[in-house]
Amino acid sequence: MKDIELAKQILNNDNKTIVIVKDGKVIFTSENKGIKPVYEAFNELKDELKGSSVSDKVVGKAASMIYKHAYIKELSTKLISQNAVDILKNTSIVFEYQKLVSYIKNREQSGMCPIEALSLDVNNIDELLSKISDFLGKERTLVLIKPDAIERKLMGEIISVYEKNFNITDLKMIKPSVEIAEKHYYEHRDKPFFNELISYIIRGNVCALIIEGKNVIERVRKINGATDPKNAEPDSIRGKFALSKQENSVHGSDSKESAEREIKIWFG
Ligand code: IDP
Ligand code: MG
């Protein structure tokens, strides 16, 4: 049975307070209600569970339940502690939901990580899962403002379009090396326009941005417009500014995988 199914089944069963699943096997269940057995269980299992705190496990639990369902690569140390990340790798911890909520409600809110805070005002596990998925649905993408736009001093105007619609979380000017340009456009290496494309992208400064938001990958590509300005919506960035199919002012990643690959190339 999948973790998620097991978790739901357990959470719908009044008799069980806590179940700890490790490597796909149930290694601990408690028939008692209340938070006390949870602490006791963690005490007993602290070596096995790397001695992390209860809150790590609460977060680890929430995260592990959606692990196979949501985009979780981004659920890094930014959102949860390293201990919870470690636990995620091989352990799922399932609490009775109401006990989890009362436990969280009694905690200092300022110390909460975002996922804990999300679980405060939901009524059941499905709501919690969908809230967390929404939260994690926040994507990142890589945008490049290409040399033709920088040369024509359109950078500010173009950045303001993204800024109004999304959060810009990182930004830099860079004159790309051939190596960076070839890595970035690797998928086009066999295309007839490849060499020309590389010469164009390295001919001057490029402004690279990491942009974050819900469905940002698809939305940025829509705002950018079609590759060839002849086909681009007139009010898209390419529709307004692109000079040709090649000198088309901006780049936006085309998938989550491309976004992560490209962010690594440009931001390390
Ligand atoms: P995209 O930037 O809209 O994702 P891709 O097909 O991935 O478009 O192409 C990458 C870049 O290569 C384009 O943005 C453009 O600068 C350039 N390019 C694409 N097709 C051509 C072409 O037919 N001739 C010249 N350059 C092209
Ligand atoms: Mg592309």
Image (cartoon, rainbow, N blue to C red):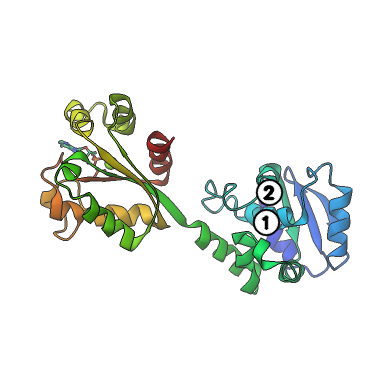
Residue located 24% across and 26% down the image? 190
Dots 1 and 2: beta carbons under 8 Å? yes
Residue wearing tag 2: 84
Using the numbered discs, state the Cα–Cα distance from disc 1 to disc 2 in whole angstroms.
7 Å
Residue that appears at 62% across and 74% down: 121
CB at mark 2 closer than 8 A to ligand 2? no
User: Residue 222 occupies which quadrant of the picture?
Assistant: bottom left
User: Residue, x 68% and y 62% (percent of image)?
Assistant: 8
Which corner quadrant holds the C terminus? top left
Residue 103 is left or right of residue 123, and the answer is: right
- For disc 1, the marked residue is 59
Which of 151/199 is in front?
151
Q: Which amino acid does the dot numbered 2 rest on?
A: Ala
Position in image of residue 42 (x %, y %)? 84, 52
* Few, some or many residues within 10 Å of mark 2 (<14, 14–19, 20+): many
> Of residues 4 and 111, which is closer to you in this image?
111
Which element is circle 2 on? helix
Using a 10 Å C-alpha cutoff, classify the residue at mark 1 as few (fewer than 14 neighbours), some (14 to 19) or many (20 or more): many
Label 1 beta carbon within 8 A of ligand 2: no
